[in-house]
Image (tube, rainbow, N blue to C red):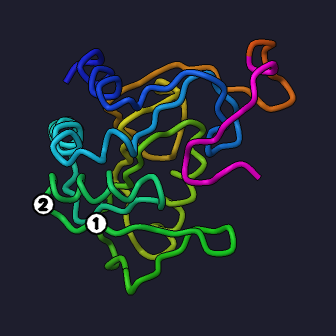
Amino acid sequence: MNREEVLGQFRTAGALLEGHFVLSSGLHSAVYLQCARVLMDAKRAALLCGALAERITSELESEIDLVVSPAMGGVVVGYEMGRQLGVPSIFTERVDGEFQLRRGFDIPEGARVLMAEDVVTTGLSSRECIDVITRLGGDVVAASCLVDRSNGKVDVGVPLFSLLGLEVPAYEETNLPPELASTPAIKPGSRGLK
């Protein structure tokens, strides 16, 4: 899939939003990509994740044994990436502010793992998830996301494959441009405004 086809899927799903948003990273942006709206249609999720899985398998020299994703945003994309790749998928959850495996999930020692996210902005959640995988004996061979808001600039410590790279400015709350500062912020993601 090319860039316009991917953006078209987000537009059709009503998932490309404009306004004033607070991202999971805490940064503010005039653009929000609501992956949950894109992924709520199983056929669209299969189409997008299938294109990403095809890219990964054609470019990655390693096999993948397991997909691990950070909850909440990565759960659906992680499941679909696992389905597309023909491997199991599990997810980490925040417990007292830190990612952990729960629900009886484990990572076999030496398993070659793909960490799968929906959107990467700063890479913090990705790096935290990768740290858990590594600490529990997994070998993270790559990371993936549907949307890389850094357009290839973020470093998560392993190769990062994305279906769509965007360079969308994001700002600290103390350094908002006037057009954002004058508009109330909303947080449409999984972690609401405090």
Q: Taking 57 as reference, is 99 above or below it?
A: below
Q: Is residue 193 magenta?
A: yes
Percent x, y of residue 143: 38, 47
Q: Residue at x 54, y 34 (%)?
A: 154
Label 1: which secondary element: strand
Q: Residue at x 75, y 29 (%)?
A: 184
Would you identify the image quadrant in which residue 96 lies? bottom right
Where does the magenta region start and end?
180-194
Quadrant holding the N terminus? top left
The residue beneath circle 2 is 86
Q: Residue at x 30, y 61 (%)?
A: 67
Type of amino acid at the residue the image marks with label 1: Ser
Label 2: which secondary element: loop
Would you identify the image quadrant in which residue 147 lies? top left
Does residue 163 appear to the left or right of 157 in the view shown? left
Percent x, y of residue 136: 46, 76
Q: Taking 36 as reference, is 63 above or below it?
A: below
Q: Is residue 174 magenta?
A: no
Residue density around tag 2, few if under 14, some if 14–19, many if 20 or more, within 10 Å? few
**Residue extending furthest toward the bottom:** 104
Type of amino acid at the residue the image marks with label 2: Gly
Residue density around tag 1, few if under 14, some if 14–19, many if 20 or more, within 10 Å? many
The residue beneath circle 1 is 89
